[in-house]
Image (cartoon, helix red, strand yellow):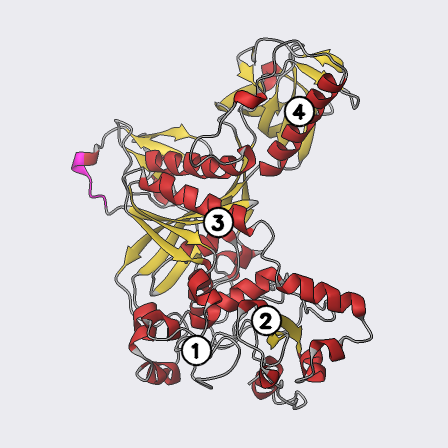
Amino acid sequence: MTTLHARSQTHPGALPQPQALESVSADKPTRVHETGHGHHRTVVPGVQHGRGETVVPVAGQRRHPGTADAVPGAVGGDTRTSHPVVFVLDRSGRPLQPTHPARARELLRKGRAVVHRHTPFVIRLKDRTATDSTIDGVEVGIDPGSCKTGIAVFTTTPGSEQGPGASDREATEAETVTQSTRADTEGPARRGMFAVEIMHRGGVIRDRLAARAGYRRRRRSKNLRYRKPRFDNRTRPAGWLGPSLQHRVDGTMSMIGRLRRWAPITAVHVERVAFDAHLLQNPDVSGIGYQHGTLHGYETREYLLGKWRHRCAYCSASGVPLNIDHIHPRSRGGSDRISNLTLACIACNQIKGNQPIEVFLAERPKVLATVLADAKRPLHNAAAVSTTRWALWRALTGTGLPVHVGSGGRTKWNRHRTAAPKSHTIDALHVGRLGTVTGWPHRILAAAATGRGAYSRTRTDRYGFPRLRLPRTKHVHGYATGDLVRAVVSTGLKRGTHLGRVAVRTTGSFNIRTRYGLVQGIHHRHCRLLQRGDGWAYTTLLETSCV
């Protein structure tokens, strides 16, 4: 059943459409063969069709039909969203179980606690120790990415196989699924408590390394060398990663280390691989239990959606339902290998039929050459991302915490089962084995890696010549660039309260970067230090489901 045909059954007013000739929807969560052949009409319990991979979620609207509607007045317009928790420390600085913001305000008002940290907000109790407290512990999920990494802090409780919104018909179908399907859907119930989205600065590191290489190349070409060359003597240790890649691992581990100081983390769940490479390379293998399991189709669909950038390979249409199509048709001897699969919109899929691609694209030779070349091209930076994930997994295992791994295909499968929107932090909440997700915070903490300054004491122009020199001292009137301050100006054009990161000047007139923009020329006597700079710039954002 194609995507458009399924829509015509859901909406009686839609015109009936013929089925696609050889493929199924690339984002349809059914237990069918990845290419649409075999196990037809076997639906996984708790899952209904949705086009979350082809459209942008609408505010207050579910992507999957049949799920519960948003209740007016709920936080973020979703009954499953809640306020992020507040981290709590005992009087010795050891982490306790996080608490609700209302409880934290009450403790501060009564004088039983003090503010330990502003962002993220952490309080420290003055009359409680960890030995006198009941600590259930929390777990952390990590969704590594190239530009952003999602981290979710959640609690787990024993759950059932059925996710939210499961109907009686789905419960009946659940009794008929195989043992492999039941094993994939069983697991604990999770509830998100806190979420962090890390924005990496790998691109900035790459550009600065390229600029430095250009400066060195110029000095060598102009014979301006001032020391003996050493580049032939340098070696790379085992497991070496480029600086822009190593930064992704170090930034994630830095945030995990901070969370361990503020919350009693007992386990970590992380995506170690994006796709199941064994399943992708040999789809005809038999005798392996997971081969016909629930995740069978999701590994290939997730790979193709990422490889072809959620677009039709023939007409470049985006934002429409996409089907998995054989470049060389099966009826003409084509295989199910990943290099013979692509994405096509319903119109192109029906027009192509079982024609050879050379005949279908005979009048568009440039498109034909692009499709044939892209079919054997791996994902852009796939090797680099995979290497980073493995390096992150090795670093996490060195912390001594139990580390559970999963694939990106399984994360997407879990997210479809729970009818959750797409975001890095929600993906982190769905990593690994779980039964259902009961909720997540409606606001997330976005942390951008900014660094702690630079060794260079000069600023150059576009030609590489020095144009100004920076002071040797980092602190000016007790403040350093990157500190979080609150400035209260009572008079003048800049009157008001300004909260943000400060950039110090030796003149005593500072610049403050707030969430609304840059405020220049704030005198230091109006500033009050809230938190020392730690190499990160923080801001709060609404979760995807609440936008």
Q: Judging from the image, what secondary structure is the residue with disc 2 in?
A: helix
* Marks 4 and 2, the one that precedes in the sequence: 4
Q: Which residue is identified by label 3? A: 386
Left or right, 48 with respect to 162, comes to: right
Left or right, 86 with respect to 422, comes to: left
Task: Answer few, some or many: residues within 10 Å of disc 4's Cα (few below 14, many 20 plus, some between 14 and 19).
Answer: few
Task: Answer few, some or many: residues within 10 Å of disc 2's Cα (few below 14, many 20 plus, some between 14 and 19).
Answer: some
The CA distance from mark 1 to mark 4 is 52 Å
Q: Which residue is identified by label 2? A: 340
The CA distance from mark 2 to mark 3 is 23 Å
Residue furthest out toward the left: 132
Q: Which residue is identified by label 4? A: 212
Q: Judging from the image, what secondary structure is the residue with disc 4 in?
A: helix
Q: What is the three-letter code of the residue carrying label 1? A: Arg
Q: Is residue 119 magenta?
A: no
Q: Position of residue 326 (x, y in %)?
A: 61, 76
The CA distance from mark 3 to mark 1 is 27 Å
Magenta stretch mostly in which secondary structure?
A: loop
